[in-house]
Amino acid sequence: MSTFNRRSFLKTAGTTLATLAMHQQLPALSPMESINNIVDCHFHLWAKDKKRFPYQPNPRYAPDYVSTAEEWDRDRVDAGISKGIFVSGAPYGDDPSFLYHSLKQAPDTLRGICLINPNVPEGVKQLEETVSGHNIVGVRLQTSWLWGVDWASPYLAAFWKRMGELNLVVQMHLEPEWNPQLDKMITRFPNTRVVIDHLGRPRNGTAVDFMLLQNIAKRPNAFIKLSSFDTESREEPPYLKVQPVVKELVEWFTPKRCVWGCNNYRGDMGSEGYLELVHHARRIFDFLNIDEQKQIFCKTPHRLYNLT
């Protein structure tokens, strides 16, 4: 395993431009070529009927387009996707109505991540009520949105522990500055699986903060989600500027604790547009052999989310 220090990072990043032209000339990849049963571990859906499924008052953002479970379940087939993890969007707050509705539209292929405030006394009760009888596999906690995360709260600790007991995944959307607090929670509750969103959000912190992921990667219950290639690279496809970071994260966590999510599925893109998202990911992961890619696209998500 290589060490993510300043010298190795600059050396690796410096090769990106040199390899960009070569990668842009790569032939089209088929996601079904040697890889089957792909799981998309991160995308959002948005209701068509916004009166029936309204956003919370004054949301931080309010998508005006539509992406439904029916559209996703149709488009996923030709894109080579077998199952998907629908992450409830922040505009819906802790109202699971649209999440429930969507999961019912594709019960065999779709699983959900809900949003619940973990910092309050009623958090555990709400957790139990929300996930009961639905295909919900985890809860997303966000340090800078909605109610945030109160790391010192005893209610958060109880919530985190109960997540493990219910065999649910804690999905962490956090800035790198909070990595020390996250590491403490992951270590304190080894039976609770945690997946860190969006490459650990390297653009949102210092190199020192981001480096702390290397310690977190040593915890067997910690996973990393390789997604948001466009926002983290701030470039058009094939997003190769972000590949050096992806390489380091895969080395730290190993493919057995890495999963992939497109993050950019839209209901109007069709199966071809969805397929292209898979193509971009395959190109970024071209430094891995086919067995390692299978771990990230298929085996690890099945194990992490207990998919059958």
Image (spheres, grey):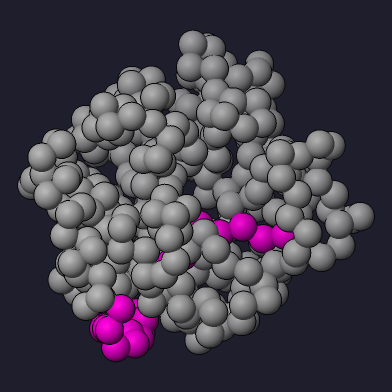
- Tell me if residue 257 comes above or below residue 265 in the rendering: above
Q: Is residue 99 visible?
A: yes
- Tell me if residue 168 comes above or below residue 22 in the rendering: above
Residue 34 falls inside the magenta stretch: yes
Place of residue 4 in the rendered image (x, y in percent of width and height, measured from the top left): 16, 40
Q: Tell me the quadrant of the picture where the C terminus can be found.
A: bottom left
Q: Is residue 251 visible?
A: no
Residue drawn at point x = 62 percent, y = 32 percent? 145
Residue drawn at point x = 43 percent, y = 60 percent? 235
Magenta segment main secondary structure: loop
Residue drawn at point x = 53 percent, y = 28 percent? 143
Question: What's the magenta region?
Answer: 24-47
Residue drawn at point x = 32 percent, y = 73 percent? 282
Give the side of residue 210 with respect to residue 156, left or right.
left
Displayed quadrant of residue 186: top left
Give the side of residue 101 with respect to residue 240, left or right.
right
Place of residue 179 in the rendered image (x, y in percent of width and height, measured from the top left): 35, 27
Place of residue 104 in the rendered image (x, y in percent of width and height, measured from the top left): 70, 64
Place of residue 151 in the rendered image (x, y in percent of width and height, measured from the top left): 48, 17
Displayed quadrant of residue 302: bottom left
